[in-house]
C-alpha cells in the first residue's frame, strides 16, 4: 500500500495508473475504520483495478466543535486494516493541505435534500460534506466512489451533487454493515459507555418492527408507536424518527404504491449521537 499526504504526490500516482488504463475506485473515510469501511473497500476491489482510500476528519462538516475534537483517531490501526484488505493507495492529508488557510465550506444547493432530517439538526453539515467530497473527487478523479447506506441522506446528497456539477464519477451505495446484535457499525460506537452499548441495539430492533408493520399501519400510527417505545428507554433519547420517500427524502404523511420509503432515526445514547435507517416495503 502506498501512502500519500500531499495532493501533488497522489495526483502523480493516479495519473500513472490512468496512463496504464487502470480504473480507480475511491472510498472516502474519516478514519477509525471498522468492518463497514472494509466492506466498501472489498466491493471497490472487485470492480476497479486500483482502490484509493482517504482518511481525513473534515472540520467543515461538524456543527459541534467538541464532537470534532473527540472524533476517534486510530491511524496506525487503520493502516493495518487497510493492508489486510489489500488497499492500493492511502491518502492522509492535513487540514492545511485540503483547505490552506481558508477552512470554510462552499455553499451548495441540493434541491431541498439538505433541508430534511439531518439538515434540520446539523446546521451547515451538508455544505461541509459537499465541499470535502467534491474536493476529494477533484484530487482523486475516481471512476467509481463507494458510500455506505447508513448515511443514506448523505448518499443521496452526493448523488445530487454529482448530477448538478456533472462530475464524471459513478456513486455506489452499499448496504449497512451491522454488529451481530444489529447495531449499525459506526466509528462513534467506540465512544459508547458499556451501559449505552448494551441498550443501543434497541434502535435497529425498533426499525425492524416498523418495517414489519409498515404494510398494515399508517405513518401516523408508526410515528406515535416509535415515540412511545423510546419513552420507555431511559438510556436512549429519540431526536427524530421519520418515514420519508427515498428519492426526495420528504417526510411521508400517507403512503403511495408508486413510491419507495425508508424509516430514518437519530438517537442520543448519552452524548453519542447514533443514526440508522431501513428500507420499507409498501403493500398498498
Image (cartoon, rainbow, N blue to C red):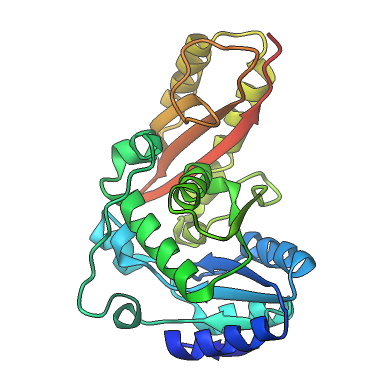
Residue 97 occupies quadrant:
bottom left
Give the image quarter of residue 144. Answer: bottom right
Q: Nearer the viewer, residue 72 or 216?
A: 216
Q: Percent from the top left, x then y, of residue 4? A: 51, 89
Q: Can residue 238 be seen in this view?
A: no
How many numbered discs? Answer: 0
Q: Residue 10, image x and y in percent?
A: 51, 86
Is residue 256 placed above or below 200 in the rendered structure?
above
Q: Which residue lies furthest to the left in this view?
A: 101
Where's the C terminus, which quadrant?
Answer: top right
Q: Residue at x 70, y 65 (%)?
A: 44
Quadrant for the N terminus, please: bottom right
Query: Which residue is depicted at the point 59% across and 66% down?
Result: 27
Percent position of residue 277, x then y? 56, 37
27 or 15: nearer the viewer: 15
Residue at the location (59% across, 12% down)? 256
Q: In this view, does 185 lie to the left or right of 30?
A: right
- 229 or 266, which lies in front? 266
The spot of residue 262 in percent (x, y) is: 57, 29
User: From where the camera sits, is residue 114 visible?
Assistant: yes
Which residue corresponds to the image point at 39% horizontal and 31% vertical from the top-left?
240
Amino acid at each position: 500500500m502506498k501512502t500519500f499526504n500531499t495532493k501533488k504526490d497522489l495526483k502523480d500516482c493516479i495519473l500513472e495508473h490512468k496512463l496504464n488504463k487502470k480504473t480507480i475506485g475511491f472510498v472516502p473515510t474519516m478514519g477509525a475504520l471498522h468492518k463497514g469501511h472494509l466492506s466498501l473497500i472489498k466491493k471497490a476491489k472487485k470492480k476497479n483495478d486500483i482502490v484509493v482510500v482517504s482518511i481525513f476528519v473534515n472540520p467543515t462538516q461538524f456543527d459541534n466543535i467538541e464532537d470534532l475534537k473527540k472524533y476517534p483517531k486510530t491511524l496506525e490501526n487503520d493502516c493495518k486494516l487497510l493492508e489486510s484488505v489489500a488497499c492500493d493507495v492511502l491518502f492522509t492529508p492535513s487540514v492545511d493541505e485540503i483547505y490552506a488557510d481558508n477552512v470554510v465550506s462552499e455553499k451548495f444547493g441540493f434541491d431541498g435534500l439538505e433541508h430534511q432530517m439531518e439538515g434540520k439538526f446539523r446546521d451547515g453539515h451538508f455544505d461541509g460534506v459537499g465541499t470535502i467530497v467534491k474536493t476529494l473527487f477533484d484530487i482523486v478523479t475516481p471512476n467509481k466512489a463507494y458510500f455506505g447506506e447508513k448515511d443514506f441522506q448523505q448518499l443521496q446528497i452526493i448523488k445530487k451533487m454529482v448530477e448538478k456539477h456533472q462530475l464524471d464519477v459513478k456513486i455506489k451505495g452499499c448496504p449497512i454493515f451491522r454488529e451481530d446484535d444489529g447495531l449499525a457499525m459506526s466509528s462513534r460506537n467506540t465512544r459508547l459507555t458499556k451501559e449505552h452499548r448494551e441498550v443501543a441495539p434497541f434502535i435497529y430492533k425498533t426499525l425492524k418492527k416498523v418495517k414489519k408493520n409498515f404494510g398494515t399501519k399508517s405513518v401516523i400510527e408508526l410515528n406515535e408507536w416509535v415515540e412511545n417505545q423510546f419513552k420507555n428507554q431511559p438510556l436512549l433519547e429519540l431526536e427524530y424518527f421519520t418515514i420519508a420517500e427515498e428519492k426526495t427524502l420528504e417526510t411521508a404523511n400517507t403512503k403511495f404504491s408508486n413510491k419507495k420509503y425508508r424509516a430514518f432515526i437519530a438517537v442520543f445514547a448519552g452524548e453519542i449521537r447514533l443514526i440508522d435507517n431501513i428500507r420499507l416495503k409498501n403493500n398498498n
